[in-house]
Image (cartoon, rainbow, N blue to C red):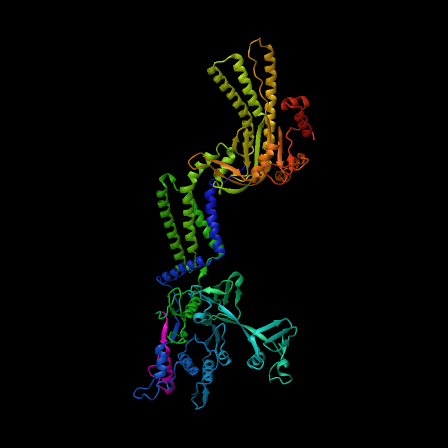
Amino acid sequence: MKFKPVKLAPALIAVGVIALFCLLRIFHLELFERMEKMTYDWRVREALRFPTATATNLAVVYIDDASIDYVRTNHLPGNKDIAELGYRYGLYWPRAVYGRLVEELSAERARVVGMDIIFADLRHDLGFVTMADGTQMESDDFFGLQLQRASNVVIAATTDIVPPNVFSTNAMALGHINTGNANSDKDPDGILRRAKAFETYRKWHFAFEKVAADPEYGVDLNNVKIEPRQIILKRSGADDIKIPLDENGEFALSAFFGDKLPRGVAPKAKPFTDERIWHMGIVLAAHELNLDLDHPNIDLAHERITLTAPNGIQRIIPVDENGYFYIDWRLRVNDPHLTQAHIEQLLLQDAKRIRGETNGLENLFAGKLVMVGSIATGNDLRDEGATPLDSSTFLVSEHWNVANSVIENKFIRRTSLGIDLLVLILTGIIIASLAWNLPMRLGVAWVFLLGAGIVLLLAAAYVVLATILYVESRYWLPIALPAVNIFVVFAGLTFYRAVFEQAEQRRVKSVFSRLVSPNIMQEVLDTKNLALGGARREVTVLFADVRGFTEFTDKSQDKAIAYIAENNLTPEAAEAYFDEQARDTLHTVNSYLALVADQIKKHDGTLDKYIGDCVMAFWGAPVAIEKQALCCVRAAIDAQRAVFELNKERLKENEKREIENLARVSGQTPRPLLPLLLLGTGINTGLATAGLMGSQKDQVNYTVFGREVNLASRLESLSGRGRILISETTYNHLRRDDPELAKTCSALPDLQKLKGFGAAVKVYEVPWRKPGEPFDEEFATRIFGDTTQSTNFIKRENM
């Protein structure tokens, strides 16, 4: 017994929609990802309405337009010619200004200073700084000295720029930043939501850097080929330089310096080292918590980075496979939780300290984690962009938000792919169940309004849940895809029920209830993709014609005419006699056609039509039938056997009538003998067009048509009496599905030229007599009414 799930069509609609949205999640379609991030931005802003713990020692020093103007124009009170700071500089300050800032923050005992300013190269054109002992020092060297003295300054590095050694070696650490429109951390919509935990930089040995710095060599360290036993320095227009490596991956410095090695330099060294530079905010927080950045547990495969401290503090940063994490945006620029000042305030305090004017000086930044960044406009110091909090803000805020997240151990944890798929499946199932169980008796409009209202309430409840989860634990549950999934599942099932379900079932029943078996009828009703308007299908077509019926009707007509003339019947009596003969004739042919139709339905075929005394049927439409050719051939065999059994019964009846007729007195009308009719059957398998034919206003018929249908009809014409002829395609199906039956088939000796077909075709005959059944020539002759045909039949059946 074939099992079909109850309500298969709507279940498949729901499954299809859910599967579609699962695929959209798997393939990370940008449209829905952008929608999801919009819901994330909304949750970030909503979270600000609920107070939450923030670090209390975060601070910021701003550089704005007023700062730049002050450094350019400052003067002592009462004397415009003397600079209040002791110096005046235009827009592009020498590094000494930043050195003075570091000097002041160190004096105020700031815990860590992070500088969101790029120091790309050395600048020798901006003069000297006069030291306390009267000596002169270049501006860059002065900044480097202050970095060394403070020993708590983190200076910025970008993907493309690492500060010169005089800065990077004297700073406490480097902190990775991305700036401006080139910020690679931004999403495609231009909003900065994520940051990269670290970048890996390649630091070349000074010997390679020396070669790269000499334009005569024309070497670019970004265009180097590294092989297991050599490094190839590519050169344009000249031979490449090949530096051999030993088994430890080290090179000999003699390749660069010959026998004159610099003092204290080992003869062999690694050509480069890969250094990890952490995000600026992580570096600040790590210094505060004493986290070990030199020995992290980086597990990108499981999307986490674990940092630990000697005192047992641990921070697990959730990242993606590329090391990116979402920033917990809480603190805007000018947020009251931040200790804030402008650079000119600190520069002025530094100048006063130098002059010994220490009364009234403030130590705002004692014990603080201080970020220094620009919020100036109209110059290349500006670093502005969009965040979830603001459409335009200064991106220096990224660093203190990251630092706050690490310090407070509050990270954005986005659901995994598995959780997202589970959410889509569960929400889809809930809505599908709701949509299917809505009472349609209320009417389509009321059902839709009721369902839509319930769905909106459920969707709103889900959004509230997702928002609460974010506000309370920064857990990012997806909203966009589940919400769209909910509405599409509901709309799809409601539309199906309202428009298709009831009307389609009534229409299908009206078309197929008399044409197919009950189990096929139910399968038709349950099928998910019934195409009644026209579809290409592989079908097996059967034509079965009742042989001898035309001859029988002609003889009946002649006998009726002779009887009327012999008995001189009145016109009314003659008409009545003709009607009786017609009823008998119709009863006779229907007796045979009914046998064929019963076998067609028994073997799950579709009864197409009666064409006079011919039956047309097919398998494989409107629903696919497993082993359709085999089902059709078996139906044909059983139909031949059923007709044969009927003929045996009619023979017995005729024998009785012959005896009765001999016993009749003269003048009595003898009982007519029952005609014995036979079947000629043609079968072919192939592609055909299947669909409803007929006017929409009148009765329509589900049928198949095409070349392969015509071939089955031609085989039926060729079959003669009591034969089943099949095409080569059908025969090949039998060989696959029932090899034993195929072995009993015999090919006709010659290729057959059929009307309407250019090329001759190969034809096979299927035997149908039951094994072991007695079938002598006399019996066959009585059945066939023709000695030649009966002899041929016995010969075929005994092969």
Total marks shown come to: 0
**x and y percentages locating residue 729 in the rendered image:** 62, 40
Q: Quadrant of residue 438?
A: top left
Whether 664 is drawn above or below 330: the answer is: above
Whether 645 is drawn above or below 347: the answer is: above
**x and y percentages locating residue 570 in the rendered image:** 47, 14
In the drawing, does residue 110 fall left or right of residue 706? left
Question: Is residue 419 among what the camera can see?
Answer: no
Q: Nearer the viewer, residue 700 or 644?
A: 700
Q: Nearer the viewer, residue 204 or 328?
A: 204
Q: Quadrant of residue 70?
A: bottom left
Residue 196 in magenta stretch: no
Residue drawn at (66%, 26%) of the image: 789
Image quadrant where one finds the C terminus:
top right
Residue drawn at (29%, 88%) of the image: 78
Q: Nearer the viewer, residue 776 or 146?
A: 776
Question: Is residue 558 among what the camera can see?
Answer: yes
Q: Which residues are magenta?
A: 336-363
Residue 338 in magenta stretch: yes
Q: Quadrant of residue 288?
A: bottom left
Q: Nearer the viewer, residue 216 or 441?
A: 216
**x and y percentages locating residue 263 in the rendered image:** 60, 85
Whether 230 is drawn above or below 187: the answer is: below
**x and y percentages locating residue 318 in the rendered image:** 48, 63
Query: Most extreme residue toward the bottom, as rendered?
Result: 134
In the drawing, does residue 548 fall left or right of residue 30? right
